Every structure is written in structure tokens, then in C-alpha cells.
Amino acid sequence: MLKLEDLSFHYTGNQDGESAQDYCFDLEANAGEIVGLTGRSGSGKSTCLDLIAGFLTPTKGRALINGDDISARPPGQRPVTILFQNNNLFEHLGTADNVALGINPSLRLTPTQKAQVNDALFKVGLDGLAERAAARLSGGEQQRVALARSLVAQKPVLLLDEPFSALDMDTRDDMLALVRRIVTERNLTCLMVTHDVRDCDRVADRRYQMVVDNGNRRVEEVQT
Amino acid sequence: MVSDWSWRPGVLVALGLLGLVVLVFVAILNVGDTTSSSTEFAGIGDILLVTTVQAGLSTLFSLCVGILLAWSLRHRHQFPGRRILLSLLSTSMVLPTLVVALGLIGVFGRRGWWNAVLGEGGIDLLHISVYGLGGIVLAHTYMDAPFMARGMLHRLENIPVEHFKLARGLGLSSWQRFRTVEWPALTPVIPGQCLVVFLLSFTSFAIVLMLGGSPRYNTLEVAIFEAVKLEFDLPRAVILALVQLAICAGLVLMAQAFRPASAAQAVQRLTFMWPESRVILIMQWTIIGLFSILFLGPLLAVSLDGMGADFSRITATDTFRRAFVSSLTLAAISAVVAITLGLLMARSQRHFSSILRSGNRSSNNIWLGLLGFSATVYLAVPALVLGLGFFLLARELSADRAIVAPVALIAANVMMALPFILVILTPALGKAADKYDRLAFSLDLRGWTRWRLIEWPVLRRDLGYLLALAFCLSLGDLGVIALFGSQDFATLPWLLYQHMGSYRTSDAAGIALILLALCLSVFFIVPRLFEGRSHAET
């Protein structure tokens, strides 16, 4: 279970003219649930994931996963995996190696772990492509490899940052269905950030959206 | 935010470099303080005026030739030999200046090819003298126009293909296309590139020494050299060095202000061919052809002249062997040190320009400024000034010349290479960070593993190129060594200069060929060793 309590971030702006901005996130997602977070581009959706994953340091507030406050841990030691819109893979590595990074960054695997990698590739429908260089995979295939990696990493929270926005309609439907199946099977907690409400309509159990309130950006749950 | 201490060593390096400059400055100032008379200022005004004119002309010609060539190469993007021409352009930076001077003398000198072709009865106007102002500007254009062209070509190739399609669709002529699409892409880099070329010409040493012909065209660098080595007038050298420092520091600060936002896009494969009119086509081919001939001519002259030399005699002398060994050793040490320091500094720059690593604090810009300035400090403290500083330090501390000289040489070489190294490594590291930082942090890739998986595959080609570049720059440089060179401590360029000075033309030609061959082979072979079999497409 994922719970954000008043998780806040202050952006001081930059030289290119982006202005200062305050963000504040309060939301909850349960195990086995896909929760959507929608909003226009630039509204701060991805900032929310950056805070949960530990890429940014919050100014205040807490992020709880199964009751533990994780907001002080370094990114690699948080029980979350994250899928980005692109650059999910190291292009010079093979498919299997990219998955194996989820188990051991030094890529030295035991036979059992190798079997796990193959198993994960099978689950996402990519068995047989284990040796192919990541750069030669299609966009959809790349996202499947990244999903396979999140499977072997065995972390309870799955964060999706517009992961399918660059894909065509059919591939996107397949991927959403695949995520749904994995989340249910593994009883994961999934937070999906997207600008496309239809993605949420298709697979999400609940949905939050970004709102601007007195210049502060926060989230509010959408009642259906 | 990730706790990350990788920025510390780089900042130490930057502070160390600035410290070194302050030390040199203090050493020079110390001597300057104790003596003062009016003769030391004699002629400085003239030197400044003539040098400014010289550097201005060199910049103007380099800019014009550079733009024309880049524009032609952008549109004639497929012809046999284009790749070779491009890689030859990149060698212009590492060609030893003395070799360039010799080559130009071979082509345009009194007994050179050009005047031989024209014959005795040719039109007077076409007889070029390679000595004096014309020769200096010609040599500077020869070395700096390719540098300009490469920068400009990069900008032109980064113009989105859609813009060309749009221009075509709107029915623009080639000239209108240049005005509306190409020129605006070039203007942001022109001031910065011009300032760099101006600085290089303003501080030019070997070319002016060889081709100046008379003290009339001396740059401050040459004047410093003459004050130390010929007139034994250290106070005058000190005054000259201080003037030089002040002017160059001012120009470098100006150059920093003109740095454009880097075009972050990758170079695109050209998929749209503009059907040029016949006149434009002829123009482009002529520019490319003419430039190729003029660029290759001097190199060919050096090669042909050199082949006639008696290599067994040249290489048999002790002086040559020692110069050969110390040249290679110093160049190798300088290259490795420069790359190491460059990597550390690039890591610090990456840290302070990434919100994921350093948060977004306003102090980041101060750190970035410090790192940027200490990287370009070489331009502000030209070789001869640095050399003079070490020279005076050695005298002050009565230190052993045999130790100070190599240290001074390595320091100058490293500082000379650093701006080139950082200009490539910093964006490369930054790009890798933008692309993979989040992923690497979430997968907990750190230290050696991260280097092996992320930085090494992205950087290896650049590292190979930069290693070769730094090596060649050091190998061919005649700067600090001019002050420290002696029978006991020589490098190949110094030996070459000695031979040219004493009219041992054949030996000089032989050494020039050896130097050229060494430079070119290192420059083309070393990067290959770093390419590896990885299928990374960069």
C-alpha cells in the first residue's frame, strides 16, 4: 500500500524563465489496485513520481509504503520500480541483460536468477528476443522489457510515468491489459501518471487529477 | 535527490588551476615590482595595434572561409572523399604550427610551387609573399577556418529537415533560404567562435616567429620570447606579460558571455535534398574543390620535401633521440593527466547542472561559473606567459631547471587541452545523465558498475578522440619549450625550430615530416582503439 501525506516540493524556478512552484501531494493506493493520476503536461504529475522514487527531495511530508516512511531512503533502496515514457533501457545492452539489471546491477547471475529472467520475458511475451540489442526493439517491445525488469525486481509498488503515451493504439491496449494482469497476479500497488484520461478509464480502479489551488498544485480524487 | 560527492574532486582541480595561475601572476608581479623604467614600455602600443589588425583580419578571413565551406559541405552531403575531407578538417587543430608554416613556405614561398607555376613573367599581383602580414593571416586562416567550418557545419546539420522542406514549399530561393533558415542558425555561435579565433591569432607564437619576417609584426607572445631569450630584458618581458594577461583575461570573460545555449539535438540524417540551381551548384563545388587543394597543398609539400631528407643521419644524433623520447613521454603524460582532470571537472559540472543531483539552488550557477572559467583559463594565460611565470619561479626558488622545465611543459599542455576536452565531455556526461540518471538511481547502479554500464559506452569514442587530440596538441606545441629548450632538454618542435633557424633545411624538412606523420597517425589510430565492438549507436 502506498500513502502520500502532505508530500511537498518547492521548485525555485530556473534561468530559462520557469517560475517558482509549490507542489503538495496527498493520495492513497492499495495493493492490487491501479490508481491513475491525470493532468496536463507541466502540471506536476511526474514530480509526484520523482518524489516517490526519490529523485527529488521533498520539503516536507511523508511517503509511506506498507506503513514505512521511505522518504529518506536513496532511490535504489526504495521498494518501488518505475517505468518512464522512454529511455527505460540501456540501448547498448541486450534484452536479457536489461532485465537482469533488476536483480543484480553487476549482471552476474546464478542459474536460478537466469531462469527468473527468462520467465519474466516469457510473461511479457518476449521469449526468444533475449539476445537482441535493446536499440533494435520496437517501442512496445522496449516497454515490455522494462516491465519484465520490474517483475524480477520484486518490489511491491509499480510507478508508471506516461509509459505508453508514445505507442500506437493497439500496442497501448495490449500493454494496459498486461499491466492489469501483472498487478492483479502479483498484488502490486500501481500508480499510473498519464495525460490521457482514457488510459485510466480502461484499467484504473480510481483516479486523481492535478488541480491548481491558490497557485499551489495538489491532487484531488475524481468521483465517478 | 541523491547524495552524491562526485563533484568534489573536480572543484578541487578547478581551484588548483586557478591557484596555479595566481602563483604565476605573483611570480611575474614580484619581478615587475622591483624594477621600473620607461624603456620597458617602448613599442607596446605599436605591437598592440599591429597585432589587433592581424588578429582581426585572421578572424574575418577564417569566418568567411568557414561559413562558405560549411554551407557547401552541408548541401553537397554525398560525394566520394567527403568523410576524408571532414576528418582532415579536424586535424587542422592538431597540426604542429611549425609544420604548417613550413608547408605554406613550400607552397607559397619564394621558391615554392605557386610562384614556380606562375613563372617569372607572371602577373605581379598574383605573386604571394608568405612572409609578413599576409603570410601570418594566411597561416591563421589555414588553421582556424576549418575550426570555424566544423562548428558551423554542426549548426547547419542540426537545422530540422522540416525547416528546409517548409522553405522549399514556400518557394524560397537559395539566397532567401540562407537568409531565413541557415543564417539564423549560425548567428548564435559566430561571436563566440570569432572571439576564440581572435584570441588564438592574438596570442599566436610559432607562426609569427616563422613568418613574421620582421619585428614589425610581433605579437606580445613573440615579444616576450625575444625579451627573455635575445635581449635578456626580464623587466620588459614582465611588463609585456602583464599587458597580455590583462587583454586575454578580458577577452575570455567576453567569450564566456557569448556562449550560446548548446543545440542539444542529435545530428540528423539528411533526408531532403534541395534541388540547387546550376550557379549555386558550381559555386559549392568550386568552394569545396579550391579549399581541398589549398588545404592539402602544404601537407603535400611537407611530405615531399621531407622524403628527400637523410633520415639515417637525423635519427643517429643523440639530440634527436632525446628530443624524440621526451616529446613522446611528455605528450603521453600530458594527455593522460588532461583527460583525468577533464573527467573530474566534467563530473562536477554535471552535478551542478542537474536538479536531481544538486537540487535547484542558485549557488549552482556560481560553481558552474568557477568550473567554466578555470577550464578556459589557458586562453587567458597564454603559454609564454605561463612559461615566463615558471621561469621566474624557478629562478626565485633556485630550483633545478631539469625538474621545472618538464613540469611547466606538462602544465601548459594540460591547460591547453582542457577547454577542448570539457567542451566535449561535459555535454556527453550531461546527456548520459539526462537519459539514464533516474533509471540508474532507481536500479541503484553506482561506482564502477555505473561507469561500466552508462558512462563508458557513451564516452569511449570521445575519450579516444580526446586522448589523441591532447597528445597531438602537446606533441606539436612550440610555446613553453621555446623558453626552456636547450641541448639537454629538447622536444621535436624545438629541434625543428633550431634547424630552421640555422638553415639546415633538409634536416628541418625531415623532422617536420616525422612530426607530421606522428601527429596524423596518433590522431587517426588512437581513436580506433577505443571504438570497440559495442553496438552503441551514438
Image (cartoon, coloured by chain):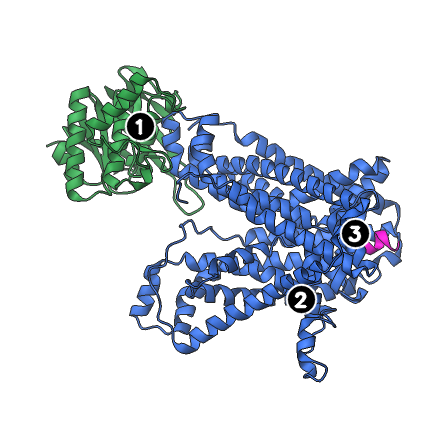
Residue under label 3, please give it. B313
Q: Main secondary structure of the magenta part?
A: helix
Colour chosen for chain B = blue
Spatial distance from mark 3 to mark 2, Cα to Cα? 35 Å
Q: Say left or right for B141 vs B32.
A: left
- Asked if residue A53 is positioned above or below residue B329 in the image, the reply reads above
Neighbor class of circle 1 (other Cα within 10 Å; few <14, some 14-19, many 20+) is many
Q: CA distance from mark 1 to mark 2?
A: 59 Å
Task: Using the rendered image, report if marks 1 and 2 lie on a common chain.
Answer: no
Location of mark 1 (residue): A99
Residue nearest the observer in this picture, B319 or B196: B319
Instruction: Kindly indicate which chain is depicted in green in the rendered structure.
Output: A
Residue B137: image tag: 2
Sequence-wise first label, 3 or 2:
2
- Which residue ends up furthest to the top in the rendered image? A67
Q: Residue at x 73, y 41 (%)?
A: B325
Examine the rendering and report whether any part of residue B133 can be seen: yes
